[in-house]
Image (spheres, rainbow, N blue to C red):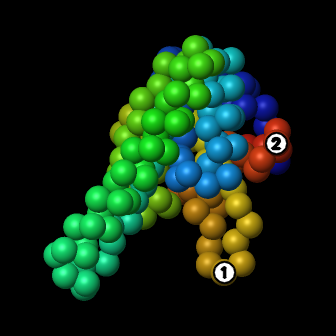
């Protein structure tokens, strides 16, 4: 059942919008939608990047190199998202989390008192999608941005 996003969140106060980003094309759709909603609802946006730690079985030098590379990529992704929000006049910040995106994003949204969660969706050939896992476990409305103005709202 599709609902209008504004209808789902009209009753809440000024709480942030949590948007998951990972640097992919699907993530860019989430950034654009979160910024648009932040502007429409006069709400701040918190962009989150959830990273899974590199495998530690390679040993410390390789582990540290991979960790450094992953953290630099996460920071670049968040900087681009925050810059997109700033260009639109939307207050935004970025956070790097560690763990499973299916678990950490809903937890973070709950802990921050988020009014809604925005995630991107991409076609997966194998395994369960992160966006569907978040839709199932989030305790607040979830907007799944599927690209150029295609949205699915669960809540």
Q: How many C-alpha atoms fall within 10 Å of the one at disc 2: few (<14), some, or many (≥20)?
A: few
Percent x, y of residue 75:
39, 44
Marks 1 and 2, how far apart at CA: 24 Å
The x and y percentages for residue 112 are 39, 34
Q: Is residue 55 above or below residue 88?
A: below
Identify the secondary structure beneath mark 1: loop
Q: Is residue 43 left or right of residue 53?
A: right
**What residue did someone put label 2 on?**
148
Task: Identify the mark at residue 126; answer none if there is no mark.
Answer: 1
Dot 1 crowding, Cα within 10 Å, few <14, some 14–19, many 20+: few
In the rendered image, the vertical position of residue 104 relative to residue 65, given as above or below: above
Residue under the image location 82 percent in, 39 percent down: 149
Quadrant of res 103: bottom left
Residue located at (61% from left, 55% from top) = 24
Q: What residue occupies the far bottom of the structure in this picture? A: 57
Circles 1 and 2, Cβ within 8 Å, touching? The answer is no
Q: Is residue 53 above or below residue 18?
A: below
Q: Position of residue 117 (x, y in %)?
A: 57, 41
């Amino acid at each position: 059942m599709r609902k209008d996003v504004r209808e789902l969140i009209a009753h809440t106060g000024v709480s942030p919008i949590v948007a998951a980003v990972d640097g992919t094309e699907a993530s860019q759709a989430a950034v654009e939608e979160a910024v648009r909603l932040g502007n429409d609802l006069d709400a701040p946006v918190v962009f989150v990047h959830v990273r899974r730690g590199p495998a530690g079985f390679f040993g410390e030098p390789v582990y540290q190199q991979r960790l450094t590379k992953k953290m630099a990529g996460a920071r670049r992704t968040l900087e681009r998202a925050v810059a997109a929000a700033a260009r639109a006049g939307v207050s935004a910040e970025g956070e790097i989390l560690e763990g499973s995106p299916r678990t950490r994003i809903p937890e973070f949204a709950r802990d921050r008192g988020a009014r809604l969660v925005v995630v991107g969706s991409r076609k997966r050939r194998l395994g369960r999608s992160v966006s569907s896992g978040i839709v199932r476990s989030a305790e607040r409305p979830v907007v799944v941005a599927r690209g150029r103005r295609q949205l699915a709202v669960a809540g």
